[in-house]
Amino acid sequence: MKKLLVLVLVAMAGLSSAWYNEATPDMLDARYAYATCDVEYAKDWLSMREGCGEENNVTVFDSTEYVDSLDDDLVDLREAADEGDSFEFGLGVFQLGADSLDLLGAIVQDALTNKTMSFFSCVRDGEDPLKDERDGCRTDALEKERGASKKYVQNEIDYANEQIDDLDGVGADTSGMEEAVEYGEELYDDIDPAFDSGDVKEIRKLHLRHSRIILVFRLEKMRATIDYAKPLIEDGNNENKEEILERMDVLDEDIAALVEGTCEYSSTVDNNFDYGRDNLECWDDSLDLFEEFLAIGALILEGA
């Protein structure tokens, strides 16, 4: 029984605490660089547009507030990247997106007010060199992210194999976890082709697949722990072992329904939006399973 308690504590700690990937700052720095490309393009474009207004005696709206908001967002992203804080960085990206949409709305509204064909022609002519500069900036940022992505994924593969070794060492069936690691290795091999394409949508597919792999690995780790613990509980003397075994069976079935059904991993991403939406739903569904796993662990300790 002591062996079981140790295993449960190890599994609980592994699933309830966050492991920090040392490549996180590099990854966030690359994404900050990409965001900077778009903000600088927006600022240069607005300045160019104002110049076209002056040349053609057309009044354009004052974009100072919008630009200040974008600059503030970049400051927040830089701070989060420097601290290696993925959560805060994600919030910053969301805010930058919202502020960018506000700016776009203001531009559209302004474009409908007292503008001339010569003004629009001037803006179109001025866009191309700015786009070329932005695209070059994006290319450099994506090269940064390519290297950071490789480090990040390899670190996760190494850490996953350590967890597998821990559970395999006590006799648990880690085949599901090992399969998830194989998915990760396949993902690693797809990093270069995706970045070589220069297509942001292809790179986004890597992010979506990565999220699903992490989810599947965590679910399979719970599964391996449950399957190992069941016979030990059956042979043990926990006062509440009937309740524990019953809840283990239900949880095992619920996990299987996710990893073998609605949340089964696929390396094929036909539609980024659909795959991303499914990821959100899968993670949401899994939260209840993680909570139940921890609750069962508490029951084991309580009745030992």
Image (cartoon, helix red, strand yellow):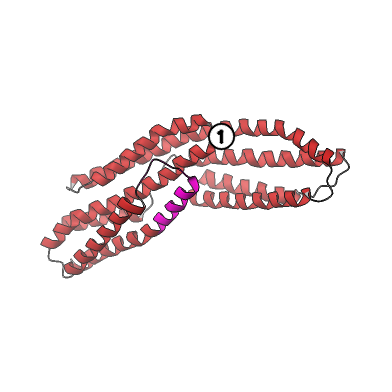
138 vs 145, left or right, is right
Kindly identify the residue that appears in the image at 57 percent across and 31 percent down: 139
Task: Say what amino acid the circle numbered 1 marks.
Answer: Ala
Kindly identify the residue that appears in the image at 83 percent across and 40 percent down: 117
Q: Which residues are magenta?
A: 265-284
* Residue 118 placement: quadrant: top right
Q: Is residue 18 visible?
A: yes
Measured from the top left, where is residue 177 in percent x and y?
Answer: 28, 45
Of residues 267 and 181, the one nearer the viewer is 267
296 vs 285, left or right, is left
Q: Which residue has dot 1 on it?
A: 141
Inspect the magenta stretch and tell me whether residue 117 lies in it: no
* The C terminus: image quadrant: bottom left
Q: How many numbered discs?
A: 1
Kindly identify the residue that appears in the image at 65 percent across and 42 percent down: 39
* Residue 181 placement: quadrant: top left
The residue furthest right is 57
Measured from the top left, where is residue 207 in percent x and y?
Answer: 45, 43
Of residues 240 and 132, the one nearer the viewer is 132
Q: Main secondary structure of the magenta part?
A: helix
Q: Categorize mark 1 by other alpha carbons within 10 Å: few (<14), some (14-19), many (20+).
A: many
Measured from the top left, where is residue 147 in percent x and y?
Answer: 47, 32
Look at the numbered disc 1 and give the secondary structure of its residue: helix
Q: Is residue 1 visible?
A: no
* The N terminus: image quadrant: bottom left
Measured from the top left, where is residue 131 in percent x and y?
Answer: 67, 34
171 vs 191, left or right, is left
